[in-house]
Image: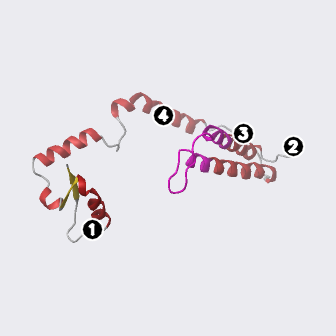
């Protein structure tokens, strides 16, 4: 008899560890950075550590668990996920993503609203700074003076 009592947990743990190891190998050459200035490898290494840790725990659980192991495929959820991905792949570019911003359209609408005078800019922009005084602008943003709503930098 095999020492593995629950092959499902054991194999799932091995799969997690394989993905964690692959993530480490792929991202190893990227700079890690620090907590305050994270590099491109920072998040992948944390993810890899979590995958390796959970994978190890899950694999060890496969040796201890006494649950009966029955292989049964659930085809309906698999078909629904694959169908959804396929429909999105075929229609995503034409229909777009519901709720995603259309930046160009939104910017054009904002410019038209400004041109039509729908925003009282004289009340919204309370402080103007020259390029030479951009440091004062950042200071005003950090510690707003009385009556500060919005400041802009003018060339």
Marks 3 and 4, the one that precedes in the sequence: 3
Question: Of discs 2 and 3, which sits in the foreground?
Answer: 2
Label 4: element kind: helix
Image position of 139 with respect to 9: above or below: below
Q: Could you tell me if residue 29 is visible in this image?
A: yes
The tag on residue 71 is 3
Span highlighted in magenta in the image: 20-47
Proximity of marks 2 and 1: CB atoms separated by less than 8 Å: no
Q: Residue at x 9, y 47 (%)?
A: 116
Q: Does residue 55 belong to the magenta stretch?
A: no
Indicate which disc, 4 or 1, sits on the residue closer to the N terminus: 4
Q: Distance from label 4 to label 1 (Cα)?
A: 48 Å
Q: Provide residue 125's location: percent of width, then percent of height.
A: 18, 59
Quadrant placement of the N terminus: top right
* N-terminal label among 3 and 1: 3
The residues bearing labels 2 and 3 have C-alpha atoms spaced at a distance of 17 Å
Name the one closer to the observer, 127 or 118. 127
Label 2 – label 1 distance at C-alpha: 69 Å
* Above or below: residue 95 compared with residue 21: above
| Residue 85: numbered disc | 4
Q: Quadrant of residue 139?
A: bottom left
Task: Kindly indicate the quadrant of the structure image that contains residue 99.
Answer: top left
Q: Earlier in the sequence, mark 2 or mark 4?
A: 2
Q: Label 1, secondary structure: give it.
A: loop
Q: Earlier in the sequence, mark 2 or mark 1?
A: 2
- Residue reaching furthest right? 1
Which residue is most to the top? 90
């Amino acid at each position: 008899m095999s020492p593995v009592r629950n092959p499902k947990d054991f194999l799932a743990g091995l799969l997690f560890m394989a993905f964690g190891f692959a993530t480490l190998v792929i991202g190893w050459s990227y700079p890690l950075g620090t907590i305050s200035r994270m590099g491109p490898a920072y998040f992948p290494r944390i993810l890899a550590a979590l995958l390796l840790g959970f994978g190890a725990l899950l694999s060890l659980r496969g040796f201890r668990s006494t649950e009966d192991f029955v292989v049964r495929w659930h085809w309906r959820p698999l078909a629904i996920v694959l169908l959804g991905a396929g429909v999105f792949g075929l229609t995503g570019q034409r229909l777009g993503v519901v709720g995603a911003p259309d930046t160009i359209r939104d910017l054009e609408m904002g410019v038209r609203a400004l041109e039509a005078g729908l925003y009282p800019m004289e009340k919204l922009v309370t402080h103007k700074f020259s390029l030479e005084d951009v440091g004062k602008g950042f200071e005003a943003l950090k510690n707003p003076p009385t009556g500060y709503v919005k400041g802009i930098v003018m060339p």
